[in-house]
Amino acid sequence: MNKLVLIVMIALFGISAQAQTKKNKNLKYTTEVNGNCEQCKKRIEKAAYAVPGVKTASWDISSHQLSVILNEEKSSPLDLNKAVAKAGHDTKEIKASTEDYDNLHSCCKYVRE
């Protein structure tokens, strides 16, 4: 009888642990991204869409907010931030390299902190 209870408890624990690690297929994620203009908007959104699993991406010029819907089974918010930083734009989480920032058009060079 004790073995049966133990087996049932292990099975239930395995099921609950598996449910906790399930990834969100429609994660709504928003982060701040530095930029200035329509050219920045196109570049930031293009970088976001290049990340596997990004379903929608929209960067607002005035608020500097990038809003995406992301499938976490394919990539993470960190992957998104890395891609945007590689395009030359600092995010709240990751700063672009000096080289990537320097490659931006002169009108796109925002004030870096």
Image (cartoon, helix red, strand yellow):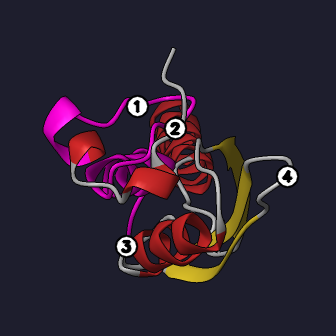
> Which one is in front in this view, the residue at disc 1 or the one at disc 3?
1
Distance between the alpha carbons at the discs numbered 4 and 3? 24 Å
Indicate the secondary structure of the residue bearing disc 1: loop
Q: Secondary structure at mark 2?
A: loop
Dot 4: element: loop
User: Residue tagged by mark 2?
Assistant: 91
Q: CA distance from mark 2 to mark 4?
A: 15 Å
Q: Residue at x 50, y 34 (%)?
A: 6
Element type at mark 3: loop
Where does the image place residue 87, in percent across and percent down from the top left?
32, 58
* 2 or 4: mark nearer the eye: 4
Q: Residue at x 50, y 64 (%)?
A: 72
The amino acid sitting under disc 3 is: Val
Residue for point 61% across, 69% down: 41
- Residues tagged 2 and 1 counted as in contact (Cβ below 8 A): yes
Q: Amino acid at mark 4?
A: Ser
The alpha-carbon separation of the residues under discs 1 and 4 comes to: 20 Å
Q: Rounded to the nearest whole Å, what is the CA distance between mark 1 and mark 3? A: 16 Å
* Residue 71 seen by the camera: no
Give the residue number, with chain letter if any, for mark 4.
62
Mark earlier in primary sequence (2, 4): 4
Q: Which residue in the rendered view is the most extreme toward the bottom?
A: 55
Q: Nearer the viewer, residue 110 or 14?
A: 110
Q: Nearer the viewer, residue 41 or 45?
A: 41
Is residue 2 part of the magenta span, yes or no? no
* Disc on res. 51: 3
